[in-house]
Image (spheres, grey):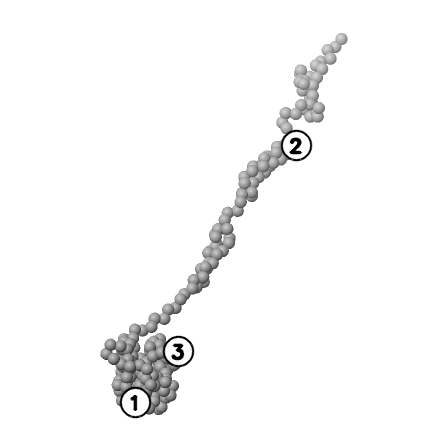
Amino acid sequence: MSDPGPPYGAGGDLGPQGANGFGPHDPDGPHHGGGPFEGAAARGLLIVIVAVVIGVILLPSATRAPLHQATTVASIPGASTAASSGGSTSSSTSTSTTTTTEPGPATVHVLVANGTTVHGAAGAVTQYLGTKGFSTLSAVNTTAPESASAVYATGGSVPAAQEVAAALDLPSTAVVASASAPVASAAGATVVVVVGTALADRFAGPGATTTTTAATTTTAAGSSH
């Protein structure tokens, strides 16, 4: 009877099935090195983890209340505007007030001109204004008869003319903002007073109501004009 030899191949080789009875490419045998499907699953899991981490980082900034913004608004002359942090604006308007200061009587040089035939009328008005503190010049006559009393701002100061008119109880309409007074010369005069009929009668006419004494404010026929 002859020896049949090793059952799995010559030389005691286990043959292509290996020691565990499975071949190296047997699909039913154990897997030790992993396959392409396991690598793809691992990469997918890593991507999911990274996405979750990024979401956790960005979520607080997405839900956080927006920061307040301060707005600067350019100011306009006469008005100022400010913007609050909440976006609402408030404005305030400043109002400038112009105050007119009347000159002191001593700084007003008055020339009185008689426009009537009442002798001494201009002199009486000149004397009266002197007692009121005005600086007076020598009385003169107008270049032509004048029936209406007027106060000319020959020096360009209407407030000065208004002050003289008030001292003579003349209405504001008697003030003339003009340097062209009906006199030969107004040199040195801030204001020229033209004595008309009513003013002449009040100061020097037969029915004059203002008199002159050393102690009181007066007018009298003290000049040839």
Q: Are marks 1 and 2 in contact (CB under 8 Å)?
A: no
Question: Which sits earlier in the primary sequence, circle 3 or circle 1?
Answer: 1
Q: Residue at x 34, y 71 (%)?
A: 101
The image quadrant of residue 28 is: top right
Answer yes or no: is residue 88 visible: yes
Alpha carbon of mark 1 to alpha carbon of mark 2: how far?
Answer: 136 Å
Question: Which sits earlier in the primary sequence, circle 1 or circle 2?
Answer: 2
Label 2's element?
A: helix
Image quarter in which the C terminus is found = bottom left
Image quarter in which the N terminus is found = top right
Query: 171 or 222, which lies in front?
Result: 222
Query: 65 or 38, which lies in front?
Result: 65
Q: Are marks 2 and 3 in contact (CB under 8 Å)?
A: no
Circle 2 residue: 37
Circle 1 residue: 119
Query: 188 or 68, which lies in front?
Result: 188
